[in-house]
Image: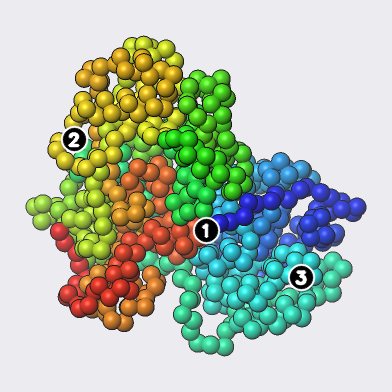
């Protein structure tokens, strides 16, 4: 479990330089932080010349501090007519400043202040993990990795073109300058990657050299005679863990099958990278199946051990909120209702477990805190039986509105074909083809993404990707029924079921069932009754009035969720099951990176009950994989969603013992 982050304080030294009492060191030279950034880090890496004409350029920094190196690099990128198309800046920071602290330190930045103000506005809460922030319409991407470098660095997935080593002095913060850190940087270095740091310590040069860097002295900045620059030139010819190069697609065209939350998010993210997208869906418009209901809640998951699900949901919630704000800023609001979410335990024991988990994690109160029943009643009209977790950033939204906003943002980059049911797919001449029921090719492209939930099993071999369908029914209370209850919360309340605030017309929704997918998708009276029982459990103060409602008079929404074996989604490149079977013996000790993959075929499936949580982040993850960009998630989180994870387990357990034929195509 990660330690709670301890934010830095905006303290100045006697000379007016930002200072850390924790490390008894200043954040930059007393000669000036921006001047140091230009001389040491940009100049030491040959920037901006090194990124000239590149599609993508990736910088990894150890020690974000107050962000001066990032701001100087961003400004240099803006001012360079030969700049790369997309600049990725990945920075590790153990003690981030607060937004208010940054504002104090940035106050005197003069012409950099407009950029600094944008950074402050996007600045995340002090939550451990990766935070992806986009600027200049996605031209500049900052991925903040918050946590201890020894824990964070091994989990980064990126290919670096340049490194900024900017931790506190080696004598004050040895952890930032260890052999393990140097090896970690080498793992991420693309051939010829450059490196620069202000220190000229001999053990730093020797450590870099042992890790494969050609390190040497260079003229230092200010009062320092020397600094260190380096180029990655390992003496060994190959490395098992070499980072992926930037992608080089001959045609930036993709087919996305499915126009729900997953498919529309993918379409928008691909378009942001300059891709043309053919979006295919069997229905008459976007968000017509599971994503069609008009109200869905989103909040994070909390567990005492900060499980994979908790970390993924935290990252997904944070990224989704940023993505939706970006849509709104571009003129495409999604109608997010950030009313807050109160999650109570199903009983007193679960409530105590929630509180213990909250205390163990030490997460900032701006993200989650404890709310008492009295506070819930007085502030939000929620007469809950016990206290619970209050997610101030939670709320609800209509999924179809998100889908429409994303397609509007994609604009002319998307060619949507509704009413186009894909009968089968095949790979032909280095491209994927989607074929209709009459044998006509609906679309052809080098990349295809399956985002059509359980329908994907018709199109591609998925013997080792267990998915099942789960029925869910949401019940709608008419305005007069809500009025008969006497009171209704103005926030989302969840526990053994959930309720949403009143809609504009005075109606409200409660839910939701989780049952086997059998029979027609029509509302059932007995499920309405079960949902009313859930409502009475959430708000026992109105249980008598709830019991007076007639479930037979209620309407509702019915949908089907697609759920994986462990309720985590399937996001990533599809495995080639036939090729894996052919090499089953050799793959007994395999890792996910060793699994053969279907070239150009990807999936974003099995979002279960967390489509709002997974869709935006999953799309960014998948498109980053397609482009060979730094991933927005740690390696273990990306691996947890890999579509090949069950195939890998079967191979390791010797459950695949013979080849079953190999084909480059797929069909249903």
Residue 540 is drawn in which quadrant?
top left
- Name the foreground residue: 453 vs 406: 453
Which numbered mark, 3 or 1, is in the foreground of this view? Answer: 3
Which residue: 73% across, 50% down? Answer: 8
In the displayed structure, 241 sits above or below 439; it is: below
Q: Which mark is residue 521?
A: 2
Gap between marks 2 and 1, in whole Å?
45 Å
Question: Where does the image place residue 194, in percent across and percent down from the top left?
Answer: 62, 74
In the displayed structure, 98 sits above or below 536; it is: below
Question: Where does the image place residue 573, in percent across and percent down from the top left?
Answer: 34, 63
- Name the foreground residue: 524 vs 590: 524
Pointer 1 residue: 86
Is residue 321 visible from the viewing direction of this image?
A: no
Which residue: 74% across, 80% down? Answer: 203
Which residue: 77% across, 81% down? Answer: 202
Quarter holding the N terminus? bottom right
Q: Are there few (<14), some (14-19), or many (20+) residues within 10 Å of tag 3?
A: some
Question: Where does the image place residue 657, in percent across and percent down from the top left?
Answer: 22, 77
Question: Where does the image place residue 611, in percent across and percent down from the top left?
Answer: 37, 43
Pointer 3 residue: 170
Gap between marks 3 and 1, in whole Å?
32 Å
Quarter holding the C terminus? bottom left
Q: Which mark is residue 564?
A: none
Q: Are there few (<14), some (14-19), or many (20+) residues within 10 Å of tag 2?
A: some
Gap between marks 3 and 2, in whole Å?
64 Å
Asked if the residue at tag 1 contacts the one at tag 3, i.e. Cβ–Cβ closer than 8 Å, the answer is no
Which residue: 39% across, 27% down? Answer: 537
Q: Are there few (<14), some (14-19), or many (20+) residues within 10 Å of tag 1?
A: many
- Name the foreground residue: 654 vs 316: 654
Q: Outermost residue, left direction?
A: 438
């Amino acid at each position: 479990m990660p330690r709670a982050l301890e934010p830095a304080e905006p303290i100045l030294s006697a000379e007016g330089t930002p200072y850390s009492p924790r490390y008894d060191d200043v954040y930059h030279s007393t000669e000036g932080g921006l001047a140091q950034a230009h001389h040491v880090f940009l100049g030491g890496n040959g920037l901006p010349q090194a990124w000239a004409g590149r599609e993508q350029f990736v910088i990894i920094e150890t020690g974000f501090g107050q962000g001066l190196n990032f701001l100087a690099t961003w400004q240099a990128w803006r001012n360079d007519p030969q700049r790369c198309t997309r600049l990725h800046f990945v920075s590790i920071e153990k003690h981030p400043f607060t937004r208010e602290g940054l504002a104090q330190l940035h106050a005197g930045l003069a012409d950099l202040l407009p950029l600094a103000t944008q950074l402050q506005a996007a600045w995340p809460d002090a939550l451990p993990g990766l935070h992806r922030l986009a600027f200049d319409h996605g031209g500049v991407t900052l991925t903040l990795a918050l946590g201890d470098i020894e824990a964070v660095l091994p989990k980064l997935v990126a290919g670096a073109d340049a490194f900024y080593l900017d931790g506190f002095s080696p004598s004050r913060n040895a952890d930032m300058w260890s052999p393990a850190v140097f090896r970690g940087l080498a793992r991420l270095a693309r051939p010829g990657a450059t490196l620069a740091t202000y220190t000229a310590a001999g053990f730093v040069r020797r450590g870099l050299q042992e890790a494969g860097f050609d390190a040497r002295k260079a003229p230092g900045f200010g009062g320092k005679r020397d600094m260190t620059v380096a180029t990655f030139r390992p003496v060994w010819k190959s490395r098992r863990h070499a980072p992926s190069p930037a992608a080089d697609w001959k045609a930036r065209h993709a087919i996305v099958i499915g126009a729900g939350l997953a498919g529309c998010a993918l379409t928008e993210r691909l378009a942001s990278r300059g891709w043309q997208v053919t979006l295919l869906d069997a229905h008459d418009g976007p968000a017509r199946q599971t994503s069609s209901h008009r109200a869905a809640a989103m909040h994070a998951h909390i567990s005492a051990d900060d499980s994979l699900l908790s970390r993924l949901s935290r990252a997904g919630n944070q990224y989704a909120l940023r993505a939706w704000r970006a849509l709104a800023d571009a003129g495409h609001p999604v109608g997010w209702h950030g009313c807050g979410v109160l999650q109570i335990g199903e009983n007193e024991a679960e409530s105590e477990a929630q509180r213990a988990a909250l205390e163990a994690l030490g997460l900032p109160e701006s993200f989650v805190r404890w709310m008492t029943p009295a506070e819930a009643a007085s502030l939000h009209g929620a007469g809950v039986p016990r206290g619970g977790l209050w997610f101030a950033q939670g709320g609800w939204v209509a999924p179809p509105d998100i889908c429409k906003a994303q397609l509007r943002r994609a604009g002319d980059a998307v060619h949507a074909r509704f009413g186009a049911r894909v009968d089968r797919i095949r790979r032909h001449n280095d491209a994927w083809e989607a074929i209709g029921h009459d044998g006509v090719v609906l679309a052809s492209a080098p990349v295809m993404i399956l985002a059509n939930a359980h329908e994907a099993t018709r199109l591609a071999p998925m013997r080792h990707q267990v998915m099942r369908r789960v029925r869910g029914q949401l019940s709608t209370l008419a305005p007069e029924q809500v009025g008969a209850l006497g009171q209704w919360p103005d926030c989302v309340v969840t526990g053994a079921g959930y309720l949403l605030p009143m809609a504009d017309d005075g109606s409200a929704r409660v839910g939701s069932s989780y049952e086997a997918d059998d029979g027609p998708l029509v509302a059932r009276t007995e499920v309405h009754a079960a949902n009313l029982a859930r409502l009475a459990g959430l708000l026992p103060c109105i249980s008598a009035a709830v019991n007076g409602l007639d479930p037979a008079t209620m309407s509702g929404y019915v949908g089907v969720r697609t759920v994986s074996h462990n309720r985590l989604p399937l996001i990533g490149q599809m495995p080639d099951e036939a090729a894996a079977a052919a090499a089953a013996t050799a793959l007994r000790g395999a890792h996910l990176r060793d699994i053969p993959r279907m070239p150009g075929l990807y999936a974003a499936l099995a979002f279960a009950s967390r489509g709002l949580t997974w869709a935006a982040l999953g799309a960014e993850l998948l498109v980053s994989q397609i482009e060979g960009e730094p991933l927005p998630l740690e390696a273990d989180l990306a691996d947890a969603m890999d579509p090949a994870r069950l195939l890998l387990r079967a191979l390791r357990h010797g459950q695949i013992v013979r080849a079953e034929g190999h084909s480059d195509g797929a069909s249903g």
